[in-house]
Image: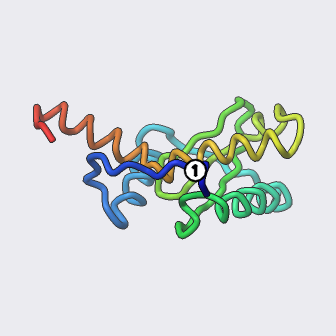
Amino acid sequence: MIFSPKPTTGSNIFKGDGDKWLADAIITVEMGSLTRVQDNEISDYVSKVGQNLVTYSRASAAEFQFIVLSDRDERAFTPGGGRIYITLGMLKAVQNEDELAGIISHEIGHNAFKHAPKTVTRQLFWMTASKR
């Protein structure tokens, strides 16, 4: 993995299972109710592509879930905690599996670098005027 950057430490108060707790909280508060696709074939395909990519990432030891939403908007996002969401709209927009792999890899990178918990940690420090 010579071309794969090593994640930096940075401030993160959400350690261990705190990362998954935060992901649940973000989804509950910010995203409202999300509707999963009922088609197991689509979900299984996206999960297989995602799991294959995880094995070659800096987050290869982490547990990931790939969730396909019935939303028509073209979106993919992660609240952290190894959860990656992709919409049917995004799946319809990609031209091939390579583009899908690029989108999923991007979200895996957000998880590997702990972007969601680090961002929330910074926001909490700013709200409380703490310096870290």
Please tell me which residue lies in front, 117 or 1: 1
Q: What is the x, y in percent for residue 53? A: 70, 57
Please tell me how many numbered marks the rendered image carries.
1
| Residue 115 vertical placement versus 38 (above, below) | above
State the residue at coordinates (72%, 42%).
102
Q: What is the x, y in percent for residue 9? A: 33, 51
Circle 1: element type: loop
| Residue 122 vertical placement versus 9 (above, below) | above
Which colour scheme appears in the figure? rainbow
Q: Along the horizontal axis of the image, is 116 left or right of 18?
A: right
Q: In which quarter of the image is the C terminus?
A: top left
Q: Along the horizontal axis of the image, is 4 left or right of 9?
A: right
Residue under label 1: 4
Q: Along the horizontal axis of the image, is 114 left or right of 54?
A: left
Q: What is the x, y in percent for residue 122? A: 26, 37
Please tell me which residue lies in front, 66 or 51: 51
State the residue at coordinates (79%, 62%).
44
Q: Residue furthest right?
A: 96
State the residue at coordinates (70%, 29%).
73
**What amino acid is at disc 1?**
Ser
Instruction: Tell me the crowding category of disc 1: few under 14, some 14 to 19, or many 20 or more residues within 10 angstroms, Cα based.
Output: few
Q: In which quarter of the image is the N terminus?
A: bottom right
Please tell me which residue lies in front, 71 or 5: 5
Q: What is the x, y in percent for residue 36? A: 68, 51
State the residue at coordinates (83%, 43%).
98
